[in-house]
Amino acid sequence: MFRLGPPKQIAYAVPNAIEAAEKWAKDFGAGPFFIAEHIPVTDVTYRGTPSTFDHTSAYGQWGDLMVELVQDHGSGPSVVRDMYDKHESGLHHLAYFVDDVDLATNELNKMGFPLGMSALAGGTRFHHVDARGTLGHFIELYEPREALLGFYERVRKAAHGWNGEEPIRIR
């Protein structure tokens, strides 16, 4: 039987990633947040059609989980706009490391969860699988490449002993 394992990240759609990161740091003690503006994403397919995905994300640590605050800059359809308009916020996805993105996506498809988006960022392929009907959010899948694991470690280490100062940092 196919199993995902524990999530590595929880992500929220937000109208403004920097403002949301400041609020999360102040109100929830998450952070510090590393900001990546207009992340270069290529080979984007949205529901089977070539597309784009222009977004800014703030990445911080929230307990044992990384939290991502995603701001979608696009005006067209996207996996973020499937759930929220540009002024709304809310839970968007849980992210998981998998050994094989295609295999995991196919297994989730068999369970009734269609592929919403596939893309490439920083040499890492990732998929957003639509689990809204059952779970109320998307599932993000990616293979744990060295650069990605290094970034997760950097965010985790920055949070260790963090005193709340300088909550916003450039990635």
Image (cartoon, grey):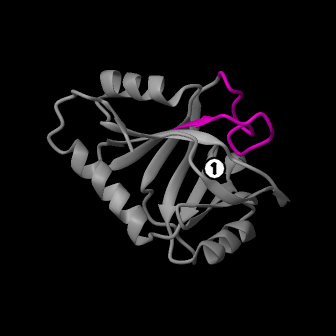
Q: Quadrant of residue 128?
A: bottom right
Foreground pick, 102 / 170: 170
- Measured as percent of width and height from the top left, residue 99 is found at 50, 77
Looking at the image, is 156 positioned above or below residue 126? above
User: Callout 1 environment at 10 Å: few (<14), some (14 to 19), or many (20+)?
Assistant: many
Give the residue pinned by disc 1.
138
- Measured as percent of width and height from the top left, residue 33 is found at 36, 37
Query: Disc count in the image?
Result: 1
The C terminus: image quadrant: top left
Residue 104: say if magenta. Answer: no
Foreground pick, 39 / 160: 39
- Measured as percent of width and height from the top left, residue 106 is found at 70, 73
The stretch in magenta equals 69-87
Drawn side of residue 132 relative to residue 121, left or right: right
Foreground pick, 91 / 18: 18
Query: What residue sits 29% from the left and 43% below the top?
Result: 63
Residue 71: say if magenta. Answer: yes
The N terminus: image quadrant: bottom right
Looking at the image, is 28 positioned above or below residue 121? above
Query: What residue sits 63% from the left and 54% below the top?
Result: 41
Q: In which quarter of the image is residue 54?
A: top right
Given the image, on which type of amino acid does mark 1 rest? Phe
